[in-house]
Image (cartoon, coloured by chain):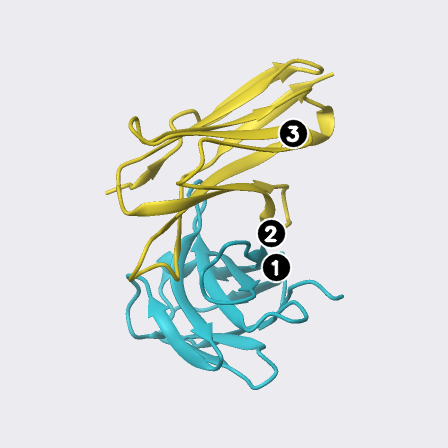
Amino acid sequence: DQQVKQNSPSLSVQEGRISILNCDYTNSMFDYFLWYKKYPAEGPTFLISISSIKDKNEDGRFTVFLNKSAKHLSLHIVPSQPGDSAVYFCAARRSGAGSYQLTFGKGTKLSVIP
Amino acid sequence: ETGVTQSPTHLIKTRGQQVTLRCSSQSGHNTVSWYQQALGQGPQFIFQYYREEENGRGNFPPRFSGLQFPNYSSELNVNALELDDSALYLCASSEGALNTEAFFGQGTRLTVV
């Protein structure tokens, strides 16, 4: 039973345009969400996070939006750059018991075309 | 400030053998979590160590065990290796157990033949 879903295995975007990566979750106990980027042969790198008490968090070119009622979050990258080409993972942490673990989606491979 | 380092980067083991993977946490971090990432999947939580104690465990059998040392480095041990244990094993360190910002190592690629 996948509690965090990234339904698009891959996404291609032109350089300079906006990349939108989506993530859905099913567990209403999740209270904190993180996005990681992963290059081949490297570990995931933390990008940006958002608490469930917010609906938006921005850091430079990266913005994460959270829609709690829809149990949906998205990562926007503007403008997209070739160096952004990587696999992006959405992860969620639950409140209370079990907050020690992150639950990850399967990832979306982003390709930014020059 | 050093990052999270894992060793070895790759290894090949035979089914039934035992393996130990190592992780040095980032300076100032007292929590280490281990994840298994199978091909085409997201990382799956194995367990977490906080101040040398196991703080939580995912859905993995007891043949997956671990340790955390006083310097907060950690080991993951897997006994009686199975072919399905072939995966990338990731270690993540954080300051505190709540994972508000966990930093990952580059991983150890384990192949069981």
Residue depicted at 45% across the width and 59% down the height: B35
At numbered mark 3, what does the secondary structure look like: helix, strand or loop? loop
Residue A109: percent from left, percent from top: 54, 30
Residue A114 at x, y percent in the picture:
74, 16
Chain B's colour is cyan
- How far across and down, in percent of the image, does residue A83 sit? 72, 30
Which chain gets the yellow colouring? A
Q: Residue sitting at 42 percent across and 43 percent down?
A: B41
Q: Element under label 1?
A: loop
Residue corresponding to mark 2: A43
Q: Measured from the top left, where is residue A12 in percent x and y?
A: 58, 18
Image side of residue B27 versus residue A31, left or right: right
Q: Is residue A4 left or right of residue B91?
A: left
Side of B104 relative to B83 (left or right): right
Give the residue displayed 44% in from the left and 40% down from the top.
Answer: B40
Which residue is denoted by mark 3 in the rendering?
A85
* Extreme-bottom residue of the structure: B70
Task: Give, as a three-letter code, the residue at label 1.
Answer: Gly
Q: Residue at x 42, y 68 (%)?
A: B48
- Quadrant in the rendering for residue B71: bottom right
- Labelled pair 1, 2 in contact (Cβ < 8 Å): yes
Q: Secondary structure at mark 2?
A: loop
Report which residue position mark 1 lands on.
Answer: B105
Which of the marked residues, 3 or 2, is nearer the chain's N terminus?
Answer: 2
Tag 1 subunit: B
Q: Quadrant of residue B84?
A: bottom left
